[in-house]
Every structure is written in C-alpha cells, then in structure tokens.
Image (cartoon, rainbow, N blue to C red):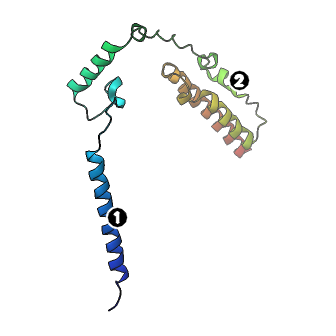
Amino acid sequence: MFGMSVFQSVLERLKTEEDAEAELRDEQSTAPSIRGLNAGFVGNLAVSAGLADSRAVQRAYFDTAGDDMLVPPKPLPAPVIPDHLSRVRPEEIATDLGITGTESQQSLADKRRTFAADNHPDRHHPDFRANATIRMKIANMLIDEAQRRLRIA
C-alpha cells in the first residue's frame, strides 16, 4: 500500500493542530480566571459599551477617587501669537524672506523651504493659522515672481 499523498498529510496535520487548539480552549474556559478592571474603567473608552454602562463606570470611578484626584485641572494660559506671525504686509514678508534680487533658483527654493518651516499654518495654534496662511501665500507669490524674473533674464 502506498503512503499518504502530500495533500492528505497536510490535511491530517491541520486536523491534529485544530484538535489540539480546541482542547486548549476547553481547558482555558474551565480554568478559573482573574477578573479585574479593563481599560474602560476610567471612562467611556470602549466603543461597544452602552451609554448607561459607561456613565455607571465613570460614576463609580469618581465615587472611589480620592479628593486630590477630583481637583479640576488649571486652565491653560491663552496662546500668545509669535511676533513674526503678526507681520503680514508684503514688505515685511519680503524683508523676512531676505530677497535681494541676486538669488539663484536654488537659493530661492531654499528660502521658500526655510520660510515654510517657520510659518506653515500646520505648525501654529489654530488661532494664528489665518496669519500664517497669509504669510505663506504672500511669500510664495514673492518667491514665484523672483523665480520668474530669473527665468526671463
């Protein structure tokens, strides 16, 4: 009689592994488990938790918290606008860029990159993003114009 085919031997191995995993699951389900607090004990962190359950958990947490934990945090100070973001006139931005008219295409590209690193709206507090956007638009227009003049000359 011939031995098992490769396919049959793989099926047998998978069946044996599946039986071993099922036996392990059965042992684990009958073993005593330790119950504790999961990550949702501090509030409504679990998406699947019902609204009533999450409120009960929050209430239980604050009911058992010490008095030192119930002190509300101090409010953050109001953000202060950086000095350079208050300069939005084209002349001021041209000065900040340091465009002299003797730059090369590469030096203008470097100036654009350096300016963006300090002025890009994503790098600033939401209250100051409008000024940062204005500065970036004007700086890009000034650099584009300087590059256009270089190409013409």
Estimate the x, y position of residue 90 in percent, counting from the top left: 63, 23
Residue 2 against residue 10 in the figure, above or below: below
In the depicted structure, whether residue 78 falls above or below residue 94: above
Camera-nearest residue between 141 and 114: 114
Q: Secondary structure at mark 2?
A: helix
Residue type, numbered disc 1: Glu
Residue drawn 29% across the image and 44% down it: 31
Q: Which residue is mark 1?
A: 17
Q: Nearer the viewer, residue 78 or 95?
A: 78
Residue at numbered disc 2: 95
Quadrant of residue 148 in the image? Answer: top right
96 to 24, vertically: above or below? above
Q: Which mark is residue 87?
A: none
How far across and down, in percent of the image, does residue 50 sit? 22, 30
What amino acid type should be assigned to the residue bearing mark 2?
Thr
Instruction: Tell me, yes or no, whether the two marked residues, 2 and 1, touch with CB atoms within 8 Å.
Output: no
| x then y, percent, for residue 14 | 33, 68
Q: State left or right for residue 56 relative to residue 96.
A: left
Q: Residue at x 33, y 24 (%)?
A: 43
Calculate the distance from the C-alpha at mark 2 to the C-alpha at mark 1: 73 Å
- Closer to the chain start, of discs 2 and 1, is 1
Residue 87 left/right relative to 15: right
Residue 62 location, quadrant: top left
Which of the two marks, 2 or 1, is nearer to us in this view? Answer: 1
